[in-house]
Amino acid sequence: MTDQSRTADDRSRDDRAAGDATEDGGSVVLLHVEPDARSAELLAVFAERFADGFVVRSVDGMAAARREIDAADCIVTEQRLPDGSGVDLIERLRTRGVEVPVVFHTTCRGDEAAAKAFDAGADGFFSKRPERGQYDRILERLCRLVDDDDVRTLRTPTPVSPDLPEPSSGASRSAE
């Protein structure tokens, strides 16, 4: 969403979220890179209502994400972006030395899509599906990545599939 297309309510919500993060110092700022406004709203509402400690800032593409990255503790991205791809975004961030955890939540499915994401430096890969619990799994994964210094240092991706139990070690690189 560009600044010109954002409504006053969007800007107000972002300003409140930014204030929340700085006031208590304990909030995790999640940068959600999602061109679909409805999908962006769903994750933001879920995090606000059911996940303690997350502040969601939504942008619609790579350019906006690169401008906002310095304030983010983690990223959730769609693969298909209007000005590139989630893989392109991660590659550019990693080239700049940005090592925040990145998780894909995407309409792109399959092993090839997941492999490209992990090769670029993703820490998790979730296919968008109309099922209960998908946002829980994404936010739980991000909590572990943000809170666990060893994971942040080692940058060991652990793909998560809603159909399989999560691996106990970061050695597995399979995805749904």
Image: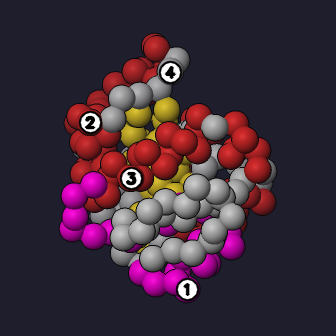
Provide residue 107's location: percent of width, then percent of height: 36, 75
Badge nearest the viewer, 2 or 3 = 3
- Answer whether residue 75 is visible to the viewer in this image: yes
Mark 2, other Cα within 10 Å: few <14 / some 14–19 / many ≥20: few
Q: Nearer the viewer, residue 165 or 95?
A: 165
Q: Which residues are magenta?
A: 109-133
Q: Nearer the viewer, residue 102 or 84?
A: 102
Question: Which residue corresponds to the image point at 49% horizontal and 35% vertical from the top-left?
Answer: 29
Q: Residue furthest top?
A: 23
Provide residue 58's location: percent of width, then percent of height: 39, 48
Q: Quadrant of residue 161?
A: bottom left
Q: For mark 3, what is the residue?
A: 137
Q: Earlier in the sequence, mark 3 or mark 4?
A: 4
Mark 3–mark 4 distance (CA, rounded to whole Å): 21 Å
Q: For mark 4, what is the residue?
A: 26
Question: Which residue corresponds to the image point at 45% horizontal and 76% vertical from the top-left?
Answer: 176
Q: For mark 2, what is the residue?
A: 50
Provide residue 79's location: percent of width, then percent of height: 48, 71
Q: Which mark is residue 112?
A: 1
Q: Identity of the amino acid at label 3?
A: Arg
